[in-house]
Image (spheres, grey):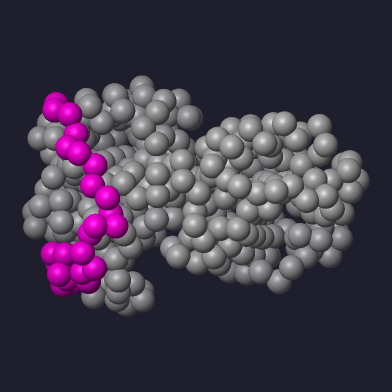
Amino acid sequence: MTDSAPATDSAAAPALGFAELGVPAPLVASLAERGITAPFPIQAATLPDTLAGRDVLGRGRTGSGKTIAFGLPLVARLARGPRAGASRPRGLVLAPTRELANQIADTLTPLAKAVGLRVSVVFGGVSQGPQVSALKGGVDILVACPGRLEDLLGQRALTLDAVEVAVLDEADHMADLGFLPGVRRILDRTPQGGQRMLFSATLDNGVDVLVKRYLSSPVTHSVDPASSPVSALTHHVFEVADVEAKRSVVEALASGTGRRLLFLRTKHQARQMARRLTESGIPAADLHGNLSQNARERNLAAFSSGEVRVMVATDIAARGIHVDDVDLVVHVDPPTEHKAYLHRSGRTARAGAGGDVVTLMLPEQRSDVATLLRLAKIRATPQRV
């Protein structure tokens, strides 16, 4: 594999529509039905290369439009070929979490349906029976979490020898979760010479090794590097005197009319906070790793629909969870590192909208929060409340 080509700045990309960028008419129409008529920067930057079949490394934060950026060339290419055979998908998208895998599939399904392709999802935490049945019925595009996919490969429930396009989404998060050895084993089972796309906010934790090993002469497009704060965000730091004062401030922040996303450090704290807010007359749902898949989907759906306006989450929700119109993100517990701060904060101010981020800080956390903000390149003067 050769080194990647020089990075291109998406700001230089021409302001063209999807059709002018080469997207097939059925896919342009499918996007238009959902009100998507103008490409986001990452889409405008990458589509000329991806539609031409080139390997692409896309660097950009979650919420920058990456799913459509890789979904359009994936669907367009597969639409030109034969339909998938039983248990032999032709397109593969790897994602680190169940929630993100489901959301990718939700975005890809209308596009695939427009050209007669089928999409399916596999992830752990649920019975594999329906997943295996779907594969046997013929799946053109498989969206998968690495753990369950490796299980199914070990059981010979599918083969990857027909994969023409492979996509890695949130590759840096897969590295954080320890999935990279599995990702390598999976990609080693896909044919060489197929198109590969990798999307990641950063290239640390071994992601650069994946790029060098699996992408052939990739073109690199960068949008919103991980080190840069989102321009539409307003950051605030509130210093609270003690834990009791902190609880009062949390209730005040959670009681607004818009959608609010509160981040805590542990599953137990998230569950307790959601229960306490609900008992105080502020309906809240929780999202963390101890919930069953059905409970996670139910709570996320309630938040997405507006049935509850407050979601209390651990860092599991900081990557890949797309809910429109989140007005406020609150770091009830400041994260331990700056990348987590940026990923959490990126749940608001998505796709050009504005948003506010509040970090709550106890007096003994002043030094840690100052370091966190400096590394994240955020300027916010602490206010005592």
User: Left or right: 58 with respect to 294?
Assistant: left
Decide if residue 140 is on the left or right side of residue 249: left
Vertical position of residue 61 compared to residue 259: above or below:
above
Q: How many marks?
A: 0
Q: Quadrant location of residue 378?
A: top right
Look at 36% across and 32% down and name the residue there.
203
- When asked about the image quadrant of residue 31, the answer is bottom left
Please tell me which residue is depicted at 56% across the width and 58% down the height of the picture: 233
Quarter of the picture holding the N terminus: top left
Report if residue 131 is visible in the image. no
In the picture provided, is 334 more to the left or to the right than 32?
Answer: right
Name the spot of residue 101 as percent of width and height, x first: 41, 48
Question: In the depicted view, which residue is nearer to us: 100 or 350?
Answer: 350
Q: Is residue 25 magenta?
A: yes
Identify whether 98 is placed above or below 172: below
- The rendered magenta stretch, by its main secondary structure, is classed as loop
**Left or right placement of residue 24 versus residue 239 in this view:** left
**Residue 18 appears at what percent x and percent y?**
21, 68
Residue in view at x 51 percent, y 61 percent: 232
| Res 131 → quadrant | top left
Q: Is residue 106 visible?
A: yes
- 135 or 329: which is nearer to us? 329
In the image, residue 106 lies in the stretch drawn in magenta: no
Q: Position of residue 159 (x, y in %)?
A: 22, 34
Decide: is 218 above or below 17.
above
Magenta segment: 1-28
Seen at 57% across and 50% down, the residue is 345
Residue 32 screen position, x and y as percent: 29, 76
